[in-house]
Image (spheres, grey):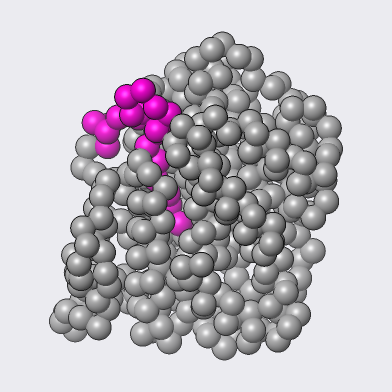
Amino acid sequence: MHVHFHGPPEPATIPAMKQGAMMRTFGTEEEFMFLDRSTLRPQNVSAEVQSLLRGRSQSGSLGTEFVAPGFITPGFITPGFITPELVPPELVHSEFLTSQIEHSSPVFEHLDQAEATLLSFRSRLAAAAAAQDALAAGVGTPFQGSDSPEVTDTVRYRRVEAELRGLVPENLINGLHVHVGIPNRQAGVAALNHVRVWLPVLQALSGNSPFWNGRDTGFTSWRSIHARRWSTAGCPPHFADAADYDRRARSLIGVGGTLDLHTIWWGARLAEKYPTLEVRVCDAQLDTRSSLLLTALTRALVSTALADADRDTAPSRLEPELLDASLWHAARDGVQSNLLDPISGELAPARVVVTALFGAVSDALEEAGDADRVRELLDRFWRLGTGAERQRAAFATGGPRALGVLLRDSVSAAD
Protein backbone atom coordinates (compact mmCIF):
# COMPACT_ATOMS: atom_id res chain seq x y z
CA MET A 1 0.00 0.00 0.00
CA HIS A 2 3.00 2.29 0.40
CA VAL A 3 2.95 4.62 -2.55
CA HIS A 4 6.11 6.70 -2.52
CA PHE A 5 9.04 6.00 -4.81
CA HIS A 6 12.29 6.43 -2.95
CA GLY A 7 15.53 7.19 -4.69
CA PRO A 8 18.36 9.68 -4.30
CA PRO A 9 17.65 12.92 -2.44
CA GLU A 10 16.72 14.82 -5.61
CA PRO A 11 15.26 12.30 -8.07
CA ALA A 12 13.96 15.06 -10.33
CA THR A 13 17.56 15.82 -11.28
CA ILE A 14 18.06 12.33 -12.71
CA PRO A 15 17.53 12.28 -16.48
CA ALA A 16 14.50 10.31 -17.56
CA MET A 17 16.34 9.25 -20.71
CA LYS A 18 19.98 8.77 -21.60
CA GLN A 19 21.19 10.87 -24.50
CA GLY A 20 20.45 9.15 -27.79
CA ALA A 21 19.07 5.92 -26.35
CA MET A 22 15.84 4.61 -24.98
CA MET A 23 17.30 4.24 -21.48
CA ARG A 24 14.50 5.24 -19.15
CA THR A 25 15.38 5.29 -15.48
CA PHE A 26 13.27 2.98 -13.38
CA GLY A 27 12.79 1.61 -9.89
CA THR A 28 10.73 -0.93 -8.01
CA GLU A 29 8.70 -1.24 -4.85
CA GLU A 30 8.42 -4.81 -3.60
CA GLU A 31 6.09 -5.78 -0.78
CA PHE A 32 6.68 -8.88 1.34
CA MET A 33 4.75 -10.63 4.09
CA PHE A 34 6.16 -12.35 7.16
CA LEU A 35 4.69 -15.80 7.80
CA ASP A 36 4.88 -18.37 10.55
CA ARG A 37 7.13 -21.13 9.26
CA SER A 38 4.72 -23.90 10.23
CA THR A 39 1.21 -22.49 9.79
CA LEU A 40 2.05 -19.93 7.06
CA ARG A 41 -0.10 -17.38 8.89
CA PRO A 42 1.03 -13.72 8.87
CA GLN A 43 3.33 -12.76 11.73
CA ASN A 44 3.49 -9.21 13.11
CA VAL A 45 7.29 -8.89 13.16
CA SER A 46 7.96 -6.07 10.70
CA ALA A 47 9.42 -3.68 13.29
CA GLU A 48 11.83 -6.30 14.60
CA VAL A 49 12.94 -7.28 11.10
CA GLN A 50 13.47 -3.65 10.15
CA SER A 51 15.71 -3.19 13.20
CA LEU A 52 17.87 -6.08 12.04
CA LEU A 53 17.96 -4.85 8.46
CA ARG A 54 19.19 -1.49 9.69
CA GLY A 55 21.93 -3.23 11.62
CA ARG A 56 20.69 -2.94 15.16
CA SER A 57 19.16 -5.46 17.46
CA GLN A 58 16.36 -4.53 19.83
CA SER A 59 19.00 -3.86 22.48
CA GLY A 60 20.67 -1.34 20.20
CA SER A 61 23.80 -3.37 19.42
CA LEU A 62 25.01 -3.86 15.88
CA GLY A 63 23.50 -6.85 14.10
CA THR A 64 26.82 -8.00 12.65
CA GLU A 65 25.52 -11.49 11.94
CA PHE A 66 23.83 -10.04 8.87
CA VAL A 67 26.90 -9.19 6.84
CA ALA A 68 26.19 -9.20 3.11
CA PRO A 69 28.22 -8.37 -0.01
CA GLY A 70 27.67 -5.37 -2.21
CA PHE A 71 26.68 -1.94 -0.92
CA ILE A 72 23.97 -0.80 -3.30
CA THR A 73 23.73 2.90 -4.02
CA PRO A 74 21.63 4.77 -6.57
CA GLY A 75 23.24 3.99 -9.91
CA PHE A 76 26.18 1.74 -9.05
CA ILE A 77 27.42 -1.10 -6.85
CA THR A 78 30.49 -0.82 -4.68
CA PRO A 79 32.07 -4.28 -4.19
CA GLY A 80 33.02 -5.40 -0.74
CA PHE A 81 31.39 -6.40 2.51
CA ILE A 82 29.24 -4.15 4.60
CA THR A 83 27.08 -4.50 7.64
CA PRO A 84 23.38 -3.72 7.30
CA GLU A 85 23.61 -0.57 9.40
CA LEU A 86 24.86 1.04 6.16
CA VAL A 87 21.71 0.14 4.24
CA PRO A 88 19.91 3.43 3.59
CA PRO A 89 16.95 3.38 6.00
CA GLU A 90 14.76 5.26 3.53
CA LEU A 91 14.72 2.19 1.27
CA VAL A 92 12.87 0.00 3.79
CA HIS A 93 9.38 0.86 4.99
CA SER A 94 6.57 -0.31 7.17
CA GLU A 95 3.40 -1.19 5.34
CA PHE A 96 -0.28 -1.00 6.26
CA LEU A 97 -0.03 -4.11 8.44
CA THR A 98 2.76 -5.01 10.85
CA SER A 99 3.11 -8.35 9.06
CA GLN A 100 4.31 -6.52 5.93
CA ILE A 101 7.40 -4.69 4.74
CA GLU A 102 8.27 -2.78 1.58
CA HIS A 103 11.58 -2.33 -0.18
CA SER A 104 11.74 0.81 -2.34
CA SER A 105 14.72 0.58 -4.64
CA PRO A 106 17.15 3.28 -5.71
CA VAL A 107 16.81 4.66 -9.22
CA PHE A 108 18.34 2.42 -11.91
CA GLU A 109 19.42 2.75 -15.51
CA HIS A 110 20.34 -0.88 -16.15
CA LEU A 111 18.62 -4.19 -15.46
CA ASP A 112 21.72 -5.75 -13.92
CA GLN A 113 21.77 -2.98 -11.30
CA ALA A 114 18.22 -3.86 -10.36
CA GLU A 115 19.00 -7.57 -10.20
CA ALA A 116 21.97 -7.07 -7.87
CA THR A 117 20.03 -4.75 -5.59
CA LEU A 118 16.93 -6.92 -5.35
CA LEU A 119 18.99 -10.06 -4.71
CA SER A 120 21.02 -8.32 -2.02
CA PHE A 121 17.97 -7.00 -0.21
CA ARG A 122 16.01 -10.25 -0.46
CA SER A 123 18.94 -12.21 1.00
CA ARG A 124 19.16 -9.85 3.96
CA LEU A 125 15.40 -9.91 4.40
CA ALA A 126 15.32 -13.71 4.49
CA ALA A 127 18.07 -13.82 7.13
CA ALA A 128 16.43 -11.15 9.29
CA ALA A 129 13.04 -12.89 9.10
CA ALA A 130 14.60 -16.22 10.05
CA ALA A 131 16.09 -14.57 13.14
CA GLN A 132 12.50 -13.79 14.16
CA ASP A 133 11.47 -17.41 13.52
CA ALA A 134 9.48 -16.32 10.47
CA LEU A 135 9.85 -16.54 6.73
CA ALA A 136 9.65 -13.61 4.34
CA ALA A 137 7.36 -14.43 1.44
CA GLY A 138 6.98 -12.75 -1.92
CA VAL A 139 3.29 -13.53 -2.39
CA GLY A 140 0.22 -11.56 -3.44
CA THR A 141 -1.77 -13.12 -0.59
CA PRO A 142 -0.71 -15.46 2.23
CA PHE A 143 -1.76 -19.11 2.32
CA GLN A 144 -3.63 -18.57 5.59
CA GLY A 145 -5.42 -15.53 6.97
CA SER A 146 -4.26 -13.68 10.05
CA ASP A 147 -5.45 -14.49 13.57
CA SER A 148 -4.64 -10.95 14.67
CA PRO A 149 -4.11 -8.43 11.85
CA GLU A 150 -2.41 -5.37 13.29
CA VAL A 151 -2.39 -2.00 11.57
CA THR A 152 0.89 -0.11 11.65
CA ASP A 153 0.47 2.71 14.16
CA THR A 154 0.83 5.86 12.09
CA VAL A 155 -1.63 8.71 11.66
CA ARG A 156 -1.99 7.94 7.97
CA TYR A 157 -2.60 4.23 8.36
CA ARG A 158 -5.10 4.85 11.16
CA ARG A 159 -7.01 7.11 8.77
CA VAL A 160 -6.94 4.38 6.13
CA GLU A 161 -8.14 1.88 8.74
CA ALA A 162 -11.08 4.14 9.56
CA GLU A 163 -12.01 4.26 5.88
CA LEU A 164 -11.59 0.52 5.22
CA ARG A 165 -13.50 -0.63 8.30
CA GLY A 166 -14.52 -4.25 7.75
CA LEU A 167 -12.03 -4.69 4.93
CA VAL A 168 -9.04 -4.34 7.27
CA PRO A 169 -8.80 -7.98 8.47
CA GLU A 170 -8.64 -9.20 4.87
CA ASN A 171 -6.37 -6.53 3.40
CA LEU A 172 -3.50 -9.03 3.37
CA ILE A 173 -2.28 -8.15 -0.11
CA ASN A 174 1.18 -7.48 -1.49
CA GLY A 175 2.26 -6.05 -4.83
CA LEU A 176 5.15 -5.21 -7.09
CA HIS A 177 5.08 -1.61 -8.31
CA VAL A 178 7.36 -0.46 -11.13
CA HIS A 179 8.21 3.22 -11.68
CA VAL A 180 9.54 4.45 -15.02
CA GLY A 181 10.93 7.94 -15.60
CA ILE A 182 8.91 10.35 -17.74
CA PRO A 183 9.96 13.77 -19.10
CA ASN A 184 6.84 15.57 -17.81
CA ARG A 185 3.24 14.95 -16.78
CA GLN A 186 1.83 15.75 -20.21
CA ALA A 187 4.00 13.05 -21.78
CA GLY A 188 3.21 10.74 -18.87
CA VAL A 189 -0.54 10.98 -19.40
CA ALA A 190 -0.12 10.39 -23.13
CA ALA A 191 1.95 7.29 -22.33
CA LEU A 192 -0.57 6.13 -19.73
CA ASN A 193 -3.26 6.08 -22.42
CA HIS A 194 -1.12 3.59 -24.36
CA VAL A 195 -0.04 1.50 -21.35
CA ARG A 196 -3.50 0.94 -19.83
CA VAL A 197 -4.64 -1.59 -22.46
CA TRP A 198 -1.70 -3.90 -21.64
CA LEU A 199 -2.35 -4.01 -17.88
CA PRO A 200 -4.34 -7.29 -18.03
CA VAL A 201 -1.37 -8.98 -19.73
CA LEU A 202 1.02 -7.84 -16.99
CA GLN A 203 -1.48 -9.03 -14.39
CA ALA A 204 -1.69 -12.44 -16.05
CA LEU A 205 2.10 -12.78 -16.11
CA SER A 206 2.40 -11.74 -12.45
CA GLY A 207 -0.32 -13.89 -10.88
CA ASN A 208 1.07 -15.18 -7.57
CA SER A 209 -1.81 -15.42 -5.12
CA PRO A 210 -3.84 -18.63 -5.59
CA PHE A 211 -4.60 -19.36 -1.92
CA TRP A 212 -6.83 -17.75 0.67
CA ASN A 213 -7.64 -19.07 4.15
CA GLY A 214 -5.93 -22.35 3.35
CA ARG A 215 -7.94 -23.05 0.21
CA ASP A 216 -7.26 -22.81 -3.51
CA THR A 217 -9.39 -19.95 -4.84
CA GLY A 218 -9.24 -21.12 -8.45
CA PHE A 219 -7.76 -17.72 -9.31
CA THR A 220 -4.21 -16.93 -10.33
CA SER A 221 -4.33 -13.52 -8.63
CA TRP A 222 -6.68 -13.47 -5.66
CA ARG A 223 -4.90 -10.29 -4.60
CA SER A 224 -6.36 -8.40 -7.53
CA ILE A 225 -9.85 -9.65 -6.67
CA HIS A 226 -9.41 -8.31 -3.14
CA ALA A 227 -8.07 -5.04 -4.51
CA ARG A 228 -11.25 -4.56 -6.56
CA ARG A 229 -13.02 -3.74 -3.31
CA TRP A 230 -11.17 -0.42 -3.28
CA SER A 231 -13.32 2.19 -4.95
CA THR A 232 -10.71 3.21 -7.53
CA ALA A 233 -9.14 -0.18 -8.32
CA GLY A 234 -8.85 -1.27 -11.94
CA CYS A 235 -7.71 0.26 -15.22
CA PRO A 236 -7.39 4.04 -15.31
CA PRO A 237 -9.66 5.81 -17.78
CA HIS A 238 -8.46 7.41 -21.00
CA PHE A 239 -7.44 11.04 -20.37
CA ALA A 240 -7.49 14.00 -22.74
CA ASP A 241 -4.30 15.50 -21.28
CA ALA A 242 -2.49 16.19 -18.01
CA ALA A 243 -5.03 18.82 -16.95
CA ASP A 244 -7.83 16.31 -17.45
CA TYR A 245 -5.90 13.72 -15.43
CA ASP A 246 -5.28 16.14 -12.56
CA ARG A 247 -8.87 17.37 -12.51
CA ARG A 248 -10.38 13.90 -12.44
CA ALA A 249 -7.89 12.58 -9.90
CA ARG A 250 -8.52 15.50 -7.52
CA SER A 251 -12.28 15.02 -7.83
CA LEU A 252 -11.91 11.58 -6.21
CA ILE A 253 -10.44 12.92 -2.96
CA GLY A 254 -12.87 12.40 -0.11
CA VAL A 255 -15.02 9.98 -2.10
CA GLY A 256 -15.08 6.23 -1.50
CA GLY A 257 -12.18 6.08 0.93
CA THR A 258 -9.80 8.08 -1.26
CA LEU A 259 -7.93 10.18 1.31
CA ASP A 260 -5.61 11.85 -1.18
CA LEU A 261 -3.95 11.32 -4.55
CA HIS A 262 -1.72 8.59 -3.07
CA THR A 263 -4.73 6.39 -2.30
CA ILE A 264 -6.01 6.25 -5.87
CA TRP A 265 -5.66 2.56 -6.72
CA TRP A 266 -5.60 2.57 -10.50
CA GLY A 267 -3.46 -0.21 -11.96
CA ALA A 268 -1.24 2.50 -13.44
CA ARG A 269 -0.98 6.18 -12.57
CA LEU A 270 1.37 9.14 -12.45
CA ALA A 271 3.41 9.40 -9.27
CA GLU A 272 2.75 12.62 -7.39
CA LYS A 273 6.14 13.07 -5.77
CA TYR A 274 8.49 11.95 -8.54
CA PRO A 275 8.55 12.24 -12.35
CA THR A 276 7.48 8.65 -13.00
CA LEU A 277 4.68 6.58 -14.43
CA GLU A 278 3.88 3.88 -11.88
CA VAL A 279 2.49 0.48 -12.90
CA ARG A 280 0.85 -1.15 -9.87
CA VAL A 281 -1.09 -4.09 -11.29
CA CYS A 282 1.40 -6.89 -10.50
CA ASP A 283 1.33 -9.30 -7.58
CA ALA A 284 4.41 -9.50 -5.37
CA GLN A 285 6.78 -12.09 -6.83
CA LEU A 286 8.29 -15.28 -5.43
CA ASP A 287 11.82 -14.56 -6.65
CA THR A 288 14.06 -11.88 -8.09
CA ARG A 289 14.02 -13.16 -11.67
CA SER A 290 10.24 -13.03 -11.79
CA SER A 291 10.30 -9.43 -10.58
CA LEU A 292 13.03 -8.64 -13.09
CA LEU A 293 10.98 -9.93 -16.04
CA LEU A 294 7.99 -7.79 -15.11
CA THR A 295 10.20 -4.77 -14.45
CA ALA A 296 11.95 -5.02 -17.82
CA LEU A 297 8.68 -5.46 -19.71
CA THR A 298 7.13 -2.52 -17.87
CA ARG A 299 10.04 -0.20 -18.59
CA ALA A 300 9.96 -1.20 -22.25
CA LEU A 301 6.19 -0.74 -22.37
CA VAL A 302 6.39 2.79 -20.96
CA SER A 303 9.33 3.66 -23.23
CA THR A 304 7.37 2.42 -26.24
CA ALA A 305 4.28 4.32 -25.12
CA LEU A 306 6.24 7.56 -24.79
CA ALA A 307 7.71 7.08 -28.26
CA ASP A 308 4.29 6.30 -29.74
CA ALA A 309 2.77 9.35 -28.08
CA ASP A 310 5.62 11.50 -29.35
CA ARG A 311 4.83 10.31 -32.88
CA ASP A 312 1.14 11.12 -32.32
CA THR A 313 0.23 7.45 -32.70
CA ALA A 314 -3.31 7.08 -31.42
CA PRO A 315 -3.68 4.69 -28.46
CA SER A 316 -6.09 1.77 -28.56
CA ARG A 317 -9.44 3.00 -27.28
CA LEU A 318 -10.73 -0.25 -25.84
CA GLU A 319 -13.92 0.29 -23.86
CA PRO A 320 -13.36 0.63 -20.10
CA GLU A 321 -15.86 -2.11 -19.33
CA LEU A 322 -13.96 -4.50 -21.62
CA LEU A 323 -10.64 -3.66 -19.98
CA ASP A 324 -12.10 -4.08 -16.50
CA ALA A 325 -13.61 -7.46 -17.39
CA SER A 326 -10.27 -8.41 -18.94
CA LEU A 327 -8.47 -7.67 -15.67
CA TRP A 328 -10.86 -10.00 -13.85
CA HIS A 329 -10.36 -12.62 -16.56
CA ALA A 330 -6.56 -12.35 -16.26
CA ALA A 331 -6.79 -12.57 -12.46
CA ARG A 332 -8.69 -15.83 -12.76
CA ASP A 333 -6.86 -17.66 -15.55
CA GLY A 334 -3.42 -16.09 -15.71
CA VAL A 335 -1.71 -17.48 -18.80
CA GLN A 336 -3.53 -20.82 -18.72
CA SER A 337 -6.24 -19.84 -21.16
CA ASN A 338 -7.07 -16.78 -23.26
CA LEU A 339 -6.28 -13.10 -22.75
CA LEU A 340 -7.64 -9.97 -24.31
CA ASP A 341 -5.39 -8.95 -27.20
CA PRO A 342 -5.14 -5.13 -26.99
CA ILE A 343 -4.34 -4.96 -30.70
CA SER A 344 -7.38 -6.88 -31.98
CA GLY A 345 -9.66 -6.26 -29.00
CA GLU A 346 -10.55 -9.96 -28.94
CA LEU A 347 -9.60 -12.96 -26.83
CA ALA A 348 -6.59 -14.95 -28.04
CA PRO A 349 -4.39 -17.69 -26.56
CA ALA A 350 -2.35 -16.23 -23.71
CA ARG A 351 0.98 -17.18 -25.23
CA VAL A 352 0.03 -15.38 -28.45
CA VAL A 353 -0.85 -12.21 -26.52
CA VAL A 354 2.35 -12.32 -24.45
CA THR A 355 4.32 -12.74 -27.68
CA ALA A 356 2.46 -9.72 -29.07
CA LEU A 357 3.51 -7.70 -26.02
CA PHE A 358 7.14 -8.70 -26.54
CA GLY A 359 6.88 -7.72 -30.19
CA ALA A 360 5.29 -4.38 -29.37
CA VAL A 361 8.14 -3.42 -27.02
CA SER A 362 11.01 -5.17 -28.82
CA ASP A 363 12.61 -1.96 -30.11
CA ALA A 364 12.71 -0.50 -26.61
CA LEU A 365 14.16 -3.74 -25.23
CA GLU A 366 16.87 -3.74 -27.89
CA GLU A 367 17.80 -0.10 -27.29
CA ALA A 368 18.02 -0.68 -23.55
CA GLY A 369 20.14 -3.80 -24.08
CA ASP A 370 17.50 -5.96 -22.39
CA ALA A 371 16.16 -8.03 -25.29
CA ASP A 372 18.30 -11.14 -24.82
CA ARG A 373 17.82 -11.12 -21.07
CA VAL A 374 14.05 -10.78 -21.39
CA ARG A 375 13.95 -13.65 -23.89
CA GLU A 376 15.85 -15.75 -21.34
CA LEU A 377 13.50 -14.70 -18.54
CA LEU A 378 10.44 -15.42 -20.69
CA ASP A 379 11.78 -18.89 -21.52
CA ARG A 380 12.19 -19.49 -17.80
CA PHE A 381 8.68 -18.20 -17.18
CA TRP A 382 7.12 -20.59 -19.70
CA ARG A 383 9.14 -23.45 -18.23
CA LEU A 384 8.23 -22.79 -14.57
CA GLY A 385 4.88 -21.04 -14.89
CA THR A 386 3.46 -18.19 -12.86
CA GLY A 387 4.06 -17.94 -9.15
CA ALA A 388 0.51 -19.23 -8.66
CA GLU A 389 1.25 -22.36 -10.69
CA ARG A 390 4.45 -22.96 -8.75
CA GLN A 391 2.66 -22.52 -5.42
CA ARG A 392 -0.05 -24.96 -6.46
CA ALA A 393 2.51 -27.52 -7.60
CA ALA A 394 4.38 -27.31 -4.30
CA PHE A 395 1.17 -27.64 -2.28
CA ALA A 396 0.05 -30.64 -4.35
CA THR A 397 3.40 -32.31 -3.70
CA GLY A 398 3.63 -31.85 0.04
CA GLY A 399 0.93 -29.59 1.45
CA PRO A 400 1.73 -26.53 3.57
CA ARG A 401 5.20 -27.81 4.46
CA ALA A 402 6.29 -28.02 0.82
CA LEU A 403 4.66 -24.68 0.08
CA GLY A 404 6.59 -23.12 2.95
CA VAL A 405 9.85 -24.50 1.59
CA LEU A 406 9.08 -22.98 -1.83
CA LEU A 407 8.32 -19.57 -0.29
CA ARG A 408 11.40 -19.64 1.94
CA ASP A 409 13.83 -20.75 -0.74
CA SER A 410 12.45 -18.58 -3.55
CA VAL A 411 12.58 -15.18 -1.87
CA SER A 412 16.38 -14.97 -2.04
CA ALA A 413 17.06 -17.46 -4.84
CA ALA A 414 19.56 -16.31 -7.45
CA ASP A 415 18.24 -18.60 -10.19
Q: Residue 319's quadrant in the figure?
A: top right
- Nearest the camera: 24 or 176? 24
Question: Left or right: 117 with respect to 381?
Answer: left
The image position of residue 362, as x and y in percent, is 58, 34
The image position of residue 40, as x and y in percent, is 58, 80
Residue at image location 57% in from the left, 54% down from the top: 377
Residue at image location 32% in from the left, 24% down from the top: 19
Query: Within the magenta stretch, is there residue 12?
Result: yes
The image position of residue 42, as x and y in percent, is 53, 75
Q: Residue 181's quadrant in the figure?
A: top left
Question: Left or right: 271 with respect to 264?
Answer: left
- Nearest the camera: 318 or 98? 318
Tell me the magenta residue range: 11-30
Query: How many discs appear?
Result: 0
Residue at image location 26% in from the left, 69% down from the top: 69
Whether 213 is drawn above or below 141: the answer is below
The kind of secondary structure the magenta stretch mainly shows is loop
Whether residue 368 is visible here, answered yes or no, is yes
Q: Residue furthest left?
A: 61
Query: Within the magenta stretch, is there residue 263?
Result: no
Residue at image location 51% in from the left, 21% down from the top: 307
